[in-house]
Image (cartoon, grey):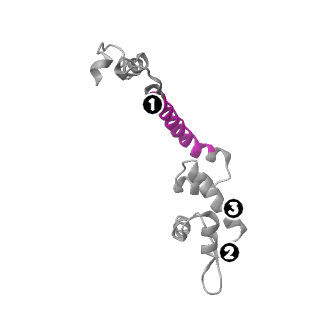
Amino acid sequence: MSIGALAARFGVATHVLRHWESKGLLHPGRDAGGRRRYGAEDLTRVAVILLSKKAGLGLDTIRSLSSTVDRATRHRILRPEAEELRSRIAAARASLELIEGGLSCGHEDVTQCPNYQRLVAERVGPGCKASAARQR
């Protein structure tokens, strides 16, 4: 398969495939004219790269993972990625809670909403008696 055909199959630009090759993620064969030729193994690699990127992994991490079959090494690579993802998920949940609270609040002035006041008080932390309404 040519680079153009592979790129079209996965909906990526050909320069992306060349970049992945330069990063050591792809190793296409070459035809007599020196043009890249991709086989079934390359299709699998591209699918794995795309899935890994969708999971939030960077190219260096993907390369490290693809070069090891050792379980302990894989875990050493993935643990910090999992922790970072858990942190981003927690932040997204907190953001969604704030937004949904604003949408469901029946108060004309959102600063009068008990949910808003609770969220502000949690953010301010203990020991501060500032009114949430003054936080505007």
Assign the magenta stretch its main secondary structure.
helix
- Residue 34 placement (x, y as % from top left): 60, 83
Horizontally, residue 92 falls left or right of residue 3, namely left
> Image quadrant of residue 47?
bottom right
Of labels 1 and 3, the one closer to you = 1
Real-space Cα separation, disc 3 to disc 2, in angstroms = 13 Å
Give amino acid for label 1. Answer: Ile
Which numbered disc, 1 or 3, marks the residue that appears first in the sequence?
3
Q: Residues within 10 Å of mark 3 (few under 14, many from 20)?
A: few
Q: Nearer the viewer, residue 94 or 39?
A: 94
Q: Earlier in the sequence, mark 1 or mark 2?
A: 2
Name the image quarter holding the N terminus: bottom right
Image vertical order of residue 73 relative to residue 86, above or below: below
Position of 29 relative to 96 (above/below): below
> Can you say whether 116 is above or below 35 in the image?
above
The answer to whether one can see residue 67 in this image is no
User: Circle 3 is placed at which residue position?
Assistant: 44
Q: Helix or strand or loop: what does disc 1 sit on? A: helix
In this figure, which residue is indicated by the disc labeled 1? 99
Image quarter where the C terminus lies is top left
Identify the residue at image location x=62%, y=53%: 51
- Residue farthest to the right, as pictured: 40
Question: Toward the viewer: 21 or 47?
Answer: 47
Answer few, some or many: residues within 10 Å of disc 2's Cα (few below 14, many 20 plus, some between 14 and 19). some
Boundaries of the magenta span: 75-98
Real-space Cα distance between discs 1 and 2?
48 Å
| Amino acid type assigned to the residue bearing label 3 in the image | Thr
Element at label 2: loop
Residue 3 falls left or right of residue 136: right
Q: Nearer the viewer, residue 102 or 129?
A: 102
The picture places residue 5, in percent across and down from the top left corner, at 64, 73
Residue type (three-letter) at the residue carrying disc 2 = Met
